[in-house]
Image (tube, rainbow, N blue to C red):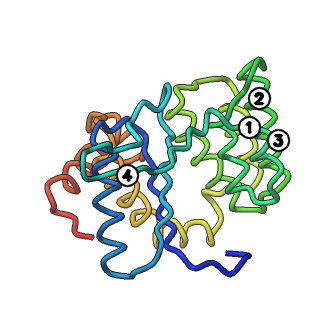
Amino acid sequence: DSEGNRFILHIEYQVANEPQMALRMAEYCIMALRKYRLPVQQHVIFLGKGRATMPVRIEEENLRFRYNLINLKDIDYRVFLKSTFPEQKILAILGNFEDEQPEHVLRHIVQEVKQSAKGLELGRYFRQMRILAQLRNLDLNFLDDMESVSSFFRKEKDILYIWGKKEGQEESQEAFVRNLLLNTDFSLEKIAMLADVSEAFVRDIQSGKKEN
């Protein structure tokens, strides 16, 4: 880090509460300690609906363990908007809106992303915001704004977009689907909807027909 300390930084993202999370994190911690002989800092970042209720400690006669649990809903959404990077700004959707109307906040976030994103990147960030909105169960008219902005650069006719989509979209979709299958109890239908793929695509990944 900036002070010269060497350690392993372990970050897990969760979209559902996992009753066995403390045991999982303890297993990862022991494996890292055994292999690398370095201090381990562990953080679980909760992205799901509601509040994180996962246990963060193990209190046994011969074992004491704890990891850090971060609930993005506890962080003021404006903290994320201070970033100069659109990838970080979009996380404001998962932040704390306090007493502000969700629609007002979401429009603010959209405007911030529009100002910081460039060209073809804008459509990608809008698709990511749609996914984050689903995680928080937000379904507001601001999505229509995102579509109207996307139309300005006509991504469906841009050769760079078409090439990039063919090269990288399926790979990113596979990774996203695998993560949802592993960390949530969502139905195949919902996972397909969130990842913008067919149920057959999700089923193939679940059955192992699509390899890593």
Residue identifier under label 1: 77
SS of the residue at dot 4? strand
Contact (Cβ within 8 Å) of mark 1 with mark 2 = yes
Per the image, the residue denoted by label 4 is 65
Q: Gap in Å between the C-alphas at discs 4 and 1?
A: 31 Å
Q: Are marks 3 and 1 in contact (CB under 8 Å)?
A: no
Q: Residues within 10 Å of mark 1 (few under 14, many from 20)?
A: many
Q: Amino acid at mark 3?
A: Gln
Amino acid beneath label 1: Tyr
Residue 158 x, y percent position in the rendering: 65, 65
Q: Is residue 19 above or below residue 26?
A: above
Residue at point 69%, 38% (across, down)? 75
> First in sequence: mark 1 or mark 2?
1
- Give the residue at mark 3: 111
Q: Position of residue 122 (x, y in %)?
A: 71, 54
Answer left or right for 82 relative to 8: right
Q: Give the mark toward the camera: 2 or 3.
A: 2
State which tag comes first along the sequence, 3 or 1.
Answer: 1
Task: Select label 3 or label 1 by which is in front.
Answer: 1
Q: Position of residue 137 (x, y in %)?
A: 52, 26
